[in-house]
Amino acid sequence: MTQVDYSSLIPNNVDLSSDLRLKRALEAWYPKYVEWWKTMGPVGFQDSEVYLRTAIGVDSEGWAKFGFVKMPEYRWGILLSPQEEDRRIGFGQHLGEPVWQEVPGEYRAMLRRLIVIQGDTEPASVEQQRFLGQTAPSLYDMRNLFQVNVEEGRHLWAMVYLLQKYFGRDGREEAEDLLKRTSGSADKPRILGAFNEATPDWLSFFMFTTFTDRDGKMQLESLAQSGFDPLARTTRFMLTEEGHHMFVGRTGVERVIQRTCQILKENGISDPHDIQKVRSHGGIDLPTIQKKINFHYSVTLDLFGAEISTNAANSFNASLKGRFRELKIDDDHRLESSTYPVARPIDGRVQIEDMPALSAINARLCDDYIADCENVLKRWNHVFATTGIDFALTLPHRAFHRAVGEFAGVEANPQGELISETEWNDRQTEWLPDDSDLQFILSLMQQTTEPGKYANWIAAPRAGINGQPGDFEYVKVAA
Ligand code: BYC
Ligand code: FE
Ligand code: FE
């Protein structure tokens, strides 16, 4: 396997120095990327020294080093997981054939579309989070935000590498366009819905990294099965980094819940539904946390596309995009005659119908995602068990608040009962954050930069990053 070359402008383990055409294309893209980072990336802090991890290898042990860097000088590298010898395609029409090292001509358009959509989400999330440094609840959290941001930047590099190496001129054009679309823009928005929503406050950030980065995990897991080996190896390495993003989200929300439980106890508030009392002590009340879950989870479910999808069937059949843990599934991996149970609105209620499994690939991935989210909710609810607070957070039903797929045309409550539009209009602020909730959360967002100190609405983490002590100065904020 090619060693990681750390001496060149673009650290890589793809032997870039021997592919001059590609090297030139990437070096031409590099300054445009840095320009994008400086204008659309984190606002402020570009001159601050941040304690960041940088990928320096692809072994499961010791693949990263930690140290202080200024973000624009971060070493965004191109790193692929090691090539597996004699790897065979695990699903679809090409099951059992050797994996492809070049793009099969007939699948070029389909593959390019998948890579572009994946690539588009990465810079989008950086754009969505660009103002959050200014309201970070601690230096620890600020550093985690910037860590996630630079790694999403690296994920963009990963997709741009594939586009520029394997898709010629079209690929170079797509790489340029990835820097031209902007999250939330009216005329050139990002491709997928959730990536045009604002991430205005830190609870939103923690919910986003819990739920939306977890969609990233599921999609990357599916692409990691791909018969196109460079895509499989690229996404495998991205998954190594993704773990931290979801950790930041899950533990972030957990720390908010911990702090709120503390406020309830310290102040003898017996009813956890008493929103005003919790708010008057500067905590985020539990019903509002539930509403934020409802919002971010439902918006993220939309990212799986329609439950019944020809696109998904085609990319599975073409052996380009597999299922979650494809190789562990006990079936024929071709799905020409099997069925899969899919929830659909029929006769005014949600019913399960068996559909051709090939068409239901998105539905299945979504089910795997929901199971993963259920585990997160268990961790959060564990805080109530240990603090003796009588409360439970839940995931809303998949039919709730959907804009894509089977449930796009109907209204449902969080329990999954289909309701009239009038009832939806009357009651949606019971289930989703309204302006006053969002304004309240925003009112708490004030920057805390004293090492070891945390804003009042969030508990301290259990441990420091990379074993650092509690009062470690993770970001040396430049004057
Ligand atoms: N918004 O057959 P359909 C991450 C479009 S997150 C807008 O239902 P398909 C990250 C669709 O494009 C992971 N449009 O769906 C997380 C299609 O349009 P065209 C990102 C949507 O294609 C946090 C039409 O509707 N990676 O990495 O089976 C931070 C019908 O599509 C939406 C990927 O998504 C939507 N929500 O599945 C940073 C993997 N949904 O082509 C990063 C690559 C659907 O007819 N993408 N449409 O004009 C894919 O695998 C698939 O494209 C999707 C959609 C799963 C997204
Ligand atoms: Fe990513
Ligand atoms: Fe991520």
Image: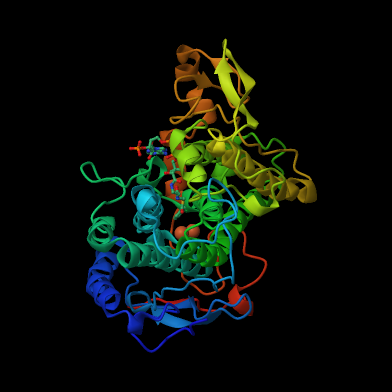
Q: Position of residue 231 (x, y in %)?
A: 46, 61
Q: Is residue 107 visible?
A: yes
Residue 38 quadrant: bottom left
Question: What coloring was used for the rendering?
Answer: rainbow
Q: Residue furthest bottom?
A: 7
Quadrant containing the C terminus is bottom left
Residue in the picture at 44% in, 54% down: 445
Q: Position of residue 134 (x, y in %)?
A: 38, 62
Residue in the picture at 63% in, 19% down: 351
Q: Is residue 138 visible?
A: no
Nearest the camera: 342 or 19? Answer: 19
Above or below for 150 versus 315 = below
Nearest the camera: 129 or 196? Answer: 196
Q: Residue furthest top?
A: 347
Q: Position of residue 67 (x, y in %)?
A: 49, 83
Residue 247 quadrant: bottom right
Residue in the picture at 57% in, 11% down: 348
Q: Position of residue 2 (x, y in %)?
A: 48, 82
Residue 83 quadrant: bottom right
Above or below for 146 versus 279 = below
Residue in the picture at 23% in, 41% down: 186
Q: Residue furthest front?
A: 97
Q: How many marks?
A: 0
